[in-house]
Amino acid sequence: MSEGISQPDRPADEISSGEGQTGDLFSKFDPVIAMREGLLAKGVEDPFNLVMEKVLSPTRAVCNGRDTILLGTYNYMGMTFDPDVIAAGEQALNDFGSGTTGSRVLNGTYQGHREVEDALREFYGFDHAMVFSTGYQANLGIISTIAGKGDYIVLDIDSHASIWDGCKLGDAEIVPFKHNDIEAMEKRLKRIPEGAGKLVVLEGVYSMLGDIAPLEEMVAVAKKYGAMVLVDEAHSMGFIGDNGRGVVEQAGVIDDVDFIIGTFSKSVGTVGGFCVSNHPKFEIMRLVCRPYVFTASLPPSVVATACTSIRKLMDGGEKRAHLWENSKALHKGLKDLGFQLGTEEPESAIIAVIMPDLEQGAAMWEALIKGGLYVNLARPPATPANMTLLRCSLCAEHSEEEVGEILAIFEKAGKAVGII
């Protein structure tokens, strides 16, 4: 045994003989394996192994040999093929090479990393910005570092996996509450011992149903009980709010939250994550946040594309307006066809179509992909209330004609499968 690894509370002879061991460590995944094999046995195309042979634009690709409309990519503002963004990446690749081969606290801070953090500070109007290699790492690192043993994290039950994992890594007391329930959140905060460190974690847009949090009321309650507030704006940055700063801006609470988490892999159109804050001690996070300290930094080409994209999003008012029109048109069209949707009205660029069960959801997904439309098939346990969802994420580059095509494909597939 390696030194430092604690031993099971069992007799030594049992340990050495191997008796009583549970066997294959993969056995815990048997239900997922059975689910996947069951779908494939029915001849359904694998919805979790799609390959894009060629990407033609932010809204179209060749998938399984078919020209396909993309409606499940989170490419909300369509920045992936922006000429200025691509040119910035090419220039950085030529000037600085393909990677940094080191973490930010060693050799991994290039000029581009400083520039993208400057762009984030300007975009949000905050004093500090810290860039991570992924959005997942941003939540993992910030949450686990600021809330540790003896502290309390109060969070929405529908929070993203990266938020839950950040809570576990930091070893704080985790106190979940019912989704978007202001009263339930306040009850949890009331029970926390006086003087304990408290962090409330919320999301602007929840990625499964596309609904938004009542941030104005929730932030007020959190501050009433002396809690710090972190809001994940991954699915609203660039799109929601007059300047695209997210639901915190739309709700008028951007100056009241302590941390905003975001990602480059959605509206920004590349990869990476970040946190912005006005806390005067925030810069110490660069030395104490393990997922930041012990991870290689983003390649120069990636931070160059992100920086250019963020600065262009500052002037993205027309794109935002068109994306809202797309969201309203698709939501109304699907509702009029008879599909059950995750929200009564469009609240974001995500529209969730609720399926009766996984088997019919997979059949519907297959009918859509064969009809030339890609959406996400979301299944339990990642979804709320064990729902099966077809999750649609619109793009500012979808034309009015493409939205019409999408509705026609949904209608044909829905009738063929018996959903409508």
Image (cartoon, rainbow, N blue to C red):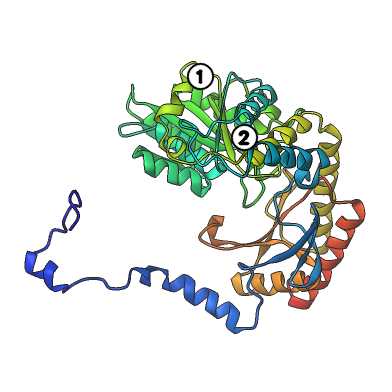
Question: Between 251 and 303, which is closer to the camera in this rendering?
Answer: 303
Mark 1 nearby-residue class (10 Å; few <14, some 14–19, many ≥20): few
Q: Position of residue 343 (x, y in %)?
A: 70, 50
| Occupied quadrant, residue 359 | bottom right
| Occupied quadrant, residue 312 | top right
In the image, is residue 58 above or below residue 187?
A: below
Q: Earlier in the sequence, mark 2 or mark 1?
A: 2
Q: Quadrant of the C terminus?
A: bottom right
In the image, is residue 203 above or below residue 335?
A: above
Question: Between 248 and 37, which is closer to the camera in this rendering?
Answer: 37
Label 1 sits on residue:
279
| Residue at 59% in and 78% down | 39
**Label 2 vs label 1, nearer the camera:** 1
Number of disc labels: 2
Amino acid at the residue labelled 2: Pro
| Occupied quadrant, residue 152 | top left
| Residue at 31% in and 34% down | 149
Label 2 sits on residue:
214
Mark 2 nearby-residue class (10 Å; few <14, some 14–19, many ≥20): some
| Residue at 76% in and 33% down | 313
| Residue at 66% in and 42% down | 235
